[in-house]
Structure formats: structure tokens, C-alpha cells
Amino acid sequence: MTAEKTFVSFFSKASIEDIKAENTKAMSIFNSETMDIVFSIPIKEFEFDKPLMKEHFNEKYLESEKFPKATFSGKVSEFSKEISGEQNATAKGKMIIHGVSREIEVPGTIMIESGKVVVKAVFKIKLVDYSVTIPQLLWKNIAEEVEVKIDFVYKAL
């Protein structure tokens, strides 16, 4: 199934200023037979409250010219397409951000609703794990760990 609607956001709580961004341009495929899930998030498509934040995010931190997307490829466990309603599920796989690949485990929920599959997850990422460096002068502006939320709606089963 191909996602017909995607929403990805991240939030960084810091002592000086909170940073949040949203992206609706991700692409994802979920195979409910094999339980394979993949998604690709175009880094430049994150929208911020302030244009300067977007510029710094793309040029100084995520280097989106060099690393244009973040990707995840893995398998979902604990989900049955035979059960209606919301189910807890876990995706285990490889996340690539800023050119760095790491095995991660993401808890979330999957719900079959009106014949569509809705996947939601909230998880944290440590910037250092993906070689995203924060200049010493800005360490109060940007948290070392960001909260990521995903919400994907896949076409009917």
C-alpha cells in the first residue's frame, strides 16, 4: 500500500527557543502481507515558523544538499490486518539521517479505519547518533534530542 497522506514533524525543546517543523511530502509504502515498511522524507520540505530556522536547518545542520532525504526501511511486528481498531505495533529497521545509518526500534500504533491503514508513531532521535553537530555557541538553542512524530494514511487494503 502506498501512503496517500503523510505528516512528519519534529520538536526540539531548548532553554532559549523551541524549534518545530512539519513536512507533508514524505513517501511511504507498507506491505501488510510481508509487514515491510519504508519511508523517505525530503529534508528540504520541512516547514518552520521562521525562514532563518529553515535555512540554518538545511545548510548548517542536516546539510540537505549533500543528504537530501532521511529514510527508514524495516518490518512491523505485532499487527494483524484481521483485527479492526487500534493496535500497538513496533517497527524495527534501518534509519538513515545525515548519511548515517542506525538500527532503531519505533513503537507506534496501526489502525484500520474505513478500509484504510493509519500508522502513527512518536519517537526520539539523538542528533549525535546521526553526526549532526551543534556549534558550542548554539547548544542552548537546540536540544540534543528531538521528538519525531509520523502519521501516515495508506490506501485501502
Image: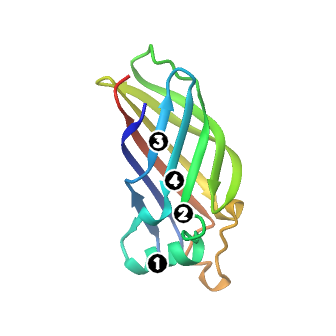
Q: Where is residue 24 in the image (x, y as percent from the top left)?
A: 37, 53
Q: Which element type, helix, strand or loop, lies under badge 1?
A: helix
Question: What whole-number distance in Å separates the C-alpha atoms at marks 2 and 4?
Answer: 18 Å
Q: Is residue 28 above or below residue 116?
A: below
Tell me which numbered mark, 3 or 4, is placed earlier along the sequence. 3
Q: Which element type, helix, strand or loop, lies under badge 2?
A: loop
Question: What whole-number distance in Å separates the C-alpha atoms at marks 1 and 4?
Answer: 20 Å
Rendered image quadrant of residue 77: top right
Tell me the amino acid under the disc marked 2. Answer: Pro
Which mark is in front, 3 or 4? 3
Which mark is in front, 3 or 1? 3
Q: Where is residue 57 in the image (x, y as percent from the top left)?
A: 51, 73
Say whether marks 1 and 4 touch (CB < 8 Å): no
Say whether marks 3 and 4 touch (CB < 8 Å): no
Q: Which element type, helix, strand or loop, lies under badge 3?
A: strand
Tell me the amino acid under the disc marked 1. Answer: Glu
Q: Where is residue 54 in the image (x, y as percent from the top left)?
A: 44, 74
Question: What whole-number distance in Å separates the C-alpha atoms at marks 3 and 2?
Answer: 16 Å
Tell me the amino acid under the disc marked 4. Answer: Val
Q: Residue furthest top?
A: 82
Q: Is residue 113 above or below residue 19?
A: above
Circle 4 residue: 148
Residue 68: mark in rendering: 2
Tell me which numbered mark, 2 or 4, is placed earlier along the sequence. 2
Tell me which numbered mark, 3 or 1, is placed earlier along the sequence. 3
Circle 3 residue: 28
Q: Which of 35 and 16 is in front in this view?
A: 35
Q: Which residue is found at the position 46% from the left and 69% from the top?
A: 19
